[in-house]
Image (tube, grey):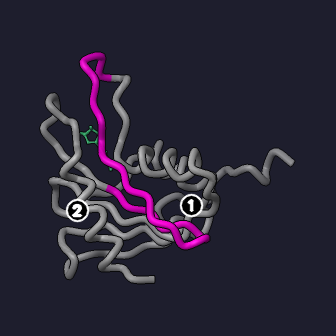
Protein backbone atom coordinates (compact mmCIF):
# COMPACT_ATOMS: atom_id res chain seq x y z
CA UNK A 1 0.00 0.00 0.00
CA UNK A 2 1.26 3.46 -0.94
CA UNK A 3 0.44 5.57 2.11
CA UNK A 4 1.61 8.79 0.55
CA UNK A 5 -0.54 8.28 -2.53
CA UNK A 6 -3.55 7.75 -0.28
CA UNK A 7 -2.75 10.92 1.66
CA UNK A 8 -2.32 12.87 -1.60
CA UNK A 9 -5.77 11.71 -2.68
CA UNK A 10 -7.26 12.79 0.65
CA UNK A 11 -5.61 16.22 0.38
CA UNK A 12 -7.06 16.66 -3.10
CA UNK A 13 -10.51 15.52 -1.98
CA UNK A 14 -10.40 18.07 0.84
CA UNK A 15 -10.49 20.81 -1.79
CA UNK A 16 -14.03 19.70 -2.65
CA UNK A 17 -15.29 20.24 0.88
CA UNK A 18 -18.58 22.10 1.16
CA UNK A 19 -18.34 23.47 4.69
CA UNK A 20 -19.69 27.03 4.82
CA UNK A 21 -21.00 26.61 8.38
CA UNK A 22 -18.09 25.05 10.25
CA UNK A 23 -15.46 26.29 7.80
CA UNK A 24 -13.64 23.08 8.66
CA UNK A 25 -12.56 21.16 5.58
CA UNK A 26 -11.97 17.43 5.64
CA UNK A 27 -10.87 15.01 2.93
CA UNK A 28 -10.66 11.23 2.98
CA UNK A 29 -9.32 8.59 0.64
CA UNK A 30 -9.93 4.90 1.02
CA UNK A 31 -8.27 1.90 -0.53
CA UNK A 32 -10.50 -1.08 -1.11
CA UNK A 33 -9.39 -4.69 -0.97
CA UNK A 34 -9.83 -4.87 -4.75
CA UNK A 35 -7.28 -2.07 -5.13
CA UNK A 36 -9.49 0.89 -5.94
CA UNK A 37 -9.23 4.35 -4.38
CA UNK A 38 -12.36 6.31 -3.49
CA UNK A 39 -12.30 9.82 -2.09
CA UNK A 40 -14.72 11.96 -0.15
CA UNK A 41 -15.12 15.33 1.50
CA UNK A 42 -17.46 16.69 4.15
CA UNK A 43 -20.68 18.15 2.78
CA UNK A 44 -22.65 20.37 5.12
CA UNK A 45 -26.25 21.50 5.03
CA UNK A 46 -28.20 24.52 6.27
CA UNK A 47 -30.15 21.98 8.31
CA UNK A 48 -27.00 20.99 10.16
CA UNK A 49 -27.87 17.39 10.96
CA UNK A 50 -28.17 16.61 7.25
CA UNK A 51 -24.41 17.09 6.88
CA UNK A 52 -22.06 14.22 6.18
CA UNK A 53 -18.43 13.64 7.04
CA UNK A 54 -15.68 13.08 4.48
CA UNK A 55 -15.10 9.52 5.64
CA UNK A 56 -18.68 8.43 5.12
CA UNK A 57 -18.84 10.14 1.74
CA UNK A 58 -15.86 8.02 0.66
CA UNK A 59 -17.26 4.79 2.11
CA UNK A 60 -20.68 5.29 0.54
CA UNK A 61 -19.13 6.06 -2.83
CA UNK A 62 -17.10 2.85 -2.67
CA UNK A 63 -20.01 0.68 -1.65
CA UNK A 64 -22.37 2.21 -4.18
CA UNK A 65 -19.79 1.58 -6.91
CA UNK A 66 -19.62 -2.10 -6.06
CA UNK A 67 -16.48 -2.33 -3.94
CA UNK A 68 -16.41 -4.09 -0.60
CA UNK A 69 -13.68 -4.45 1.97
CA UNK A 70 -11.84 -1.38 3.22
CA UNK A 71 -8.11 -1.96 3.47
CA UNK A 72 -7.08 1.53 4.50
CA UNK A 73 -8.30 5.10 4.79
CA UNK A 74 -6.37 8.36 4.95
CA UNK A 75 -7.97 11.41 6.55
CA UNK A 76 -6.89 15.05 6.42
CA UNK A 77 -8.66 17.94 8.10
CA UNK A 78 -8.06 21.44 9.30
CA UNK A 79 -6.92 20.39 12.77
CA UNK A 80 -3.62 18.88 13.83
CA UNK A 81 -4.36 15.22 13.00
CA UNK A 82 -8.10 15.02 12.33
CA UNK A 83 -9.53 11.78 13.71
CA UNK A 84 -12.73 10.18 12.46
CA UNK A 85 -15.87 10.75 14.52
CA UNK A 86 -17.61 7.87 16.27
CA UNK A 87 -20.27 7.43 13.61
CA UNK A 88 -17.66 7.22 10.86
CA UNK A 89 -15.63 4.69 12.85
CA UNK A 90 -18.71 2.48 13.02
CA UNK A 91 -19.42 2.86 9.29
CA UNK A 92 -15.81 1.96 8.44
CA UNK A 93 -16.12 -1.02 10.79
CA UNK A 94 -18.97 -2.47 8.73
CA UNK A 95 -16.67 -2.95 5.74
CA UNK A 96 -13.21 -2.88 7.29
CA UNK A 97 -12.83 -4.62 10.63
CA UNK A 98 -9.05 -4.72 10.05
CA UNK A 99 -8.72 -1.41 8.23
CA UNK A 100 -5.67 0.79 8.65
CA UNK A 101 -6.57 4.38 9.52
CA UNK A 102 -4.07 7.09 8.64
CA UNK A 103 -4.60 10.55 10.07
CA UNK A 104 -2.35 12.95 8.25
CA UNK A 105 -1.20 16.53 8.38
CA UNK A 106 0.80 16.08 5.19
CA UNK A 107 2.30 13.32 3.07
CA UNK A 108 5.22 13.02 5.46
CA UNK A 109 3.51 13.73 8.75
CA UNK A 110 0.96 11.13 9.70
CA UNK A 111 -0.09 8.67 12.38
CA UNK A 112 -1.33 5.22 11.66
CA UNK A 113 -3.76 3.01 13.60
CA UNK A 114 -5.75 -0.14 13.23
CA UNK A 115 -9.48 0.46 13.34
CA UNK A 116 -9.59 -1.86 16.33
CA UNK A 117 -7.46 0.68 18.25
CA UNK A 118 -9.97 3.44 17.50
CA UNK A 119 -13.09 1.33 18.02
CA UNK A 120 -12.33 -1.49 20.44
CA UNK A 121 -14.80 -4.30 21.22
CA UNK A 122 -16.93 -3.18 18.31
CA UNK A 123 -20.26 -4.46 17.09
CA UNK A 124 -20.41 -5.72 13.53
CA UNK A 125 -22.34 -7.75 10.99
CA UNK A 126 -21.12 -11.11 12.31
CA UNK A 127 -22.92 -10.47 15.60
CA UNK A 128 -26.28 -10.61 13.86
CA UNK A 129 -25.66 -14.08 12.47
N1 LIG B 1 -15.85 16.18 9.92
C1 LIG B 1 -15.48 15.25 9.01
O1 LIG B 1 -15.84 15.30 7.84
N2 LIG B 1 -14.68 14.23 9.44
C2 LIG B 1 -14.10 14.17 10.67
O2 LIG B 1 -13.33 13.28 10.92
C3 LIG B 1 -14.41 15.20 11.67
C4 LIG B 1 -15.50 16.13 11.31
C5 LIG B 1 -16.65 17.32 9.44
C6 LIG B 1 -18.07 17.36 9.88
C7 LIG B 1 -18.35 18.85 9.75
O3 LIG B 1 -18.67 19.14 8.40
C8 LIG B 1 -17.03 19.51 10.08
O4 LIG B 1 -16.06 18.50 9.87
C9 LIG B 1 -16.94 20.05 11.48
O5 LIG B 1 -17.32 19.09 12.42
Q: Which residues are magenta?
A: 28-48
Q: Is residue 42 magenta?
A: yes
Mark 1 touching mark 2, by CB under 8 A? no
* 121 up-or-down from 128: above or below: below
In front: 46, or 38?
38
Q: Secondary structure at mark 1?
A: loop
The numbered dot on residue 11 is 2
Q: Position of residue 74 (x, y in %)?
A: 36, 66
Q: Is residue 67 magenta?
A: no
The quarter of the picture where residue 113 lies is: bottom left
Badge 1 density bin: few <14, some 14–19, many ≥20, Cα 10 Å:
few
* 126 up-or-down from 34: above or below: above
Ligand 1 in which quarter: top left
Distance between the Cα atoms at labels 1 and 2? 28 Å
Q: Residue at x 53, y 54 (%)?
A: 92
Q: Residue at x 58, y 49 (%)?
A: 63
In front: 60, or 22?
60
Q: Position of residue 118 (x, y in %)?
A: 46, 62
Left or right, residue 109 beside residue 47: left
Badge 2 density bin: few <14, some 14–19, many ≥20, Cα 10 Å:
many
Q: Quadrant of the N terminus?
A: bottom left
Q: Position of residue 69 (x, y in %)?
A: 62, 63
Question: Which residue matches tag 1?
Answer: 120
Q: Position of residue 60 (x, y in %)?
A: 51, 45
Marks 1, 2: nearer the viewer: 2
Left or right, residue 50 beside residue 31: left
In front: 50, or 63?
63
Amino acid sequence: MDRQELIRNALEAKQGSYSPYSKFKVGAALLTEDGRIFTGCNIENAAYSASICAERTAVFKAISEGSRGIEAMAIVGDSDYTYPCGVCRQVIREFGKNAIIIVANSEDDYREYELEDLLPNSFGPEHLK
